[in-house]
Image: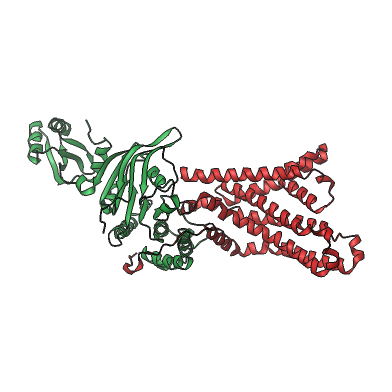
Amino acid sequence: MPIYDQGYRRYEARGPLHRIRFWPITREALRLILARRAFLGLLAPPLGVFLFYVGRAYVVTRFPEVGRVLPSDGRMFGEFLDIQVFFAVLLSIFGASGLVANDLRTGAILVYLSRPLTRRDYVLGKLGVPIALNLAVTLVPGLLLYGACLALAPEQFAKWELWWIGPAVVAHSIAASLVVSLVVLALSSLSRSARVAGLAFAGIYLGLDMVRAILQHGFNLKAAVLLSLQADLQALGVALFGVVDRQLDIFWGWPLLVLAVVALGCLAVLRSRVRAVEIVT
Amino acid sequence: MSDNGEPLVTFEDLAVSYGLVQALSGVSGAFRSGPTGLLGPNGAGKTTLLKTLLGFLTPDRGKLSAFGLDPVRQPLEVRRRLGYMPEQDCHVAGMTAAAFVAFAGELSGLPRDEAISRAHEVLYYVGLGEARYRNVETYSTGMKQRVKLAQALVHDPDLLLLDEPTNGLDPEGREEMLTLVHDIATKRGMSLILCSHLLRDVERVCENVIVFNQGKVAKAGKVRELTGTRRQVFDVRFKGDGAAVLTDLKDLGADWREGEDGVRLFLPEGHGPETIFRLARECGVQVRHLRPGAETLEDVFLRALGHEIQS
């Protein structure tokens, strides 16, 4: 193939480096993920659930007698977010399990690390992807649902006793999104295969919950809640939204502590794996 | 063209280790403007030097300076002035070449519009203009090598680090890649470090060379000076007991090694082909082939590594 003499020019216009250097990483990864039609299909169910809950809020506020069967207070948001977190997990499996694994497989990680980026920039850039996806199905619809409830029944929801719903939606969405994102990213960094990372995440998320169920039902071990990531997140939701769930009847500080330890552990794994690539590759 | 003025990179008494393994033990040297070859066998410390230059590794001791900056303390400023073409495959899964190279430019600090514009230019330059909208994963090995070069070039670095750029290429692809690298170094005036175990690649492209062995600089200098005709070199084939002739030649101070075309002889000053013929006649051996040659970089390399002399 010929070399085009006119095809290369020197570039002398270097400006200062961007402050938010991780943004192009997040943006391009999101662009690639959202370009997959199959993935867009995954966004439909959480949207459907959101519309269902808006409809439910409408029915409950218009026909108060229905409220005897279906709660129309903070518990409704707890149930809603519980479902949405499940979709967030699905989105993370299909959208984020390859984020680091694919970079390790294709060698792209060296392209990132040999640029004016820190390892923190790289991790933040990648972490931004599952967080954005997760917040898109938890925080955004959660707040929209809250807004819809306020608009439909201000006399019911704009009460001083229910001021905490908005902050609770934000807190639960952020906590769930952050933990799920960190776990899927850490698992992604431990493999060169997106499928293996995705299966490992599904296994951990669902498998540990099965172990929790066996221990709880078989041995009446309440503390088994702490074993399961899913149960820990649900327990946090129970505490935040006042949902009654006997299986998750545990002091909210413990699941919070477990989630914090898991998040820190994932950060340590990511730090170690990305550092190892610089040295070993 | 290079000016060979102030060194772009200097390293002095540089020591780097991986735990207990000493990868670089007190090496000193400099990379000046222009193309420089970095030679050495596996484990010699070439890649370790590049990684330290990129700020991946922290030296145990010594000084390293790139463009007057410290890669340990100012890695981002150093990296934005470097272009790195890794040895192994590298591309972002699912991206076209145009998107990938533009993305690489953006990561290097170029504004998005400029990165896109330059990505197209650079892809044309490396000969991938027609294929730039194809997914990189569908590329052949040669095309992937070109994409790697393009991503290293897109931000117009001051120093290009090429780690085995002809790896996995067929002879034609290798020739094209070397032509491209030579063009970058000469016509585009870009400084580069060519890290390779293929001596002919370095000989073809580079003006200067640094030979690494066991974590130390074994030899450094201009390729022309190192491969000059300080010693007379002959490729010889004998019929009969050639070993006897070689033993006699060794007594005269000559070195030899097995070459591609018989035995490669390095005669000391004051001796020429007549010495070979005389000793062959004395030993009753026939000289079937004798061709004068120049000392190649391979000879320099092997001499630096202490592998040349065979008894």
> How many discs mark residues in the rendered view?
0
The residue lying at 17 percent from left, 39 percent from top is B265
* Chain seen in green: B
Q: Quadrant of the N terminus of chain A?
A: bottom left
Q: Is residue A30 visible?
A: yes
* Chain seen in red: A
The x, y position of residue B97, in whole percent, is 46, 62
Q: Give the color scheme: rainbow, by chain, secondary structure or one colour.
A: by chain
The residue lying at 38 percent from left, 60 percent from top is B156
Q: Is residue A35 left or right of residue B215?
A: right
Residue placed furthest toward the front: A160
Question: What is the quadrant of residue A46 in the picture?
Answer: bottom right
Question: What is the quadrant of residue A70 in the picture?
Answer: bottom right
| Figure check: A185 above or below B284 | below
Q: Is residue B228 left or right of residue A167?
A: left
Question: What is the quadrant of residue B48 in the picture?
Answer: top left
The residue lying at 70 percent from left, 47 percent from top is A205
- Nearest the viewer among A12 and A185 is A12
The x, y position of residue B65, in whole percent, is 36, 47
- Nearest the viewer among B262 and B147 is B147
Q: Is residue A196 visible?
A: no
Q: Is residue A193 left or right of residue A57?
A: left
The x, y position of residue B207, in whole percent, is 25, 51
The x, y position of residue A99, in whole percent, is 57, 54
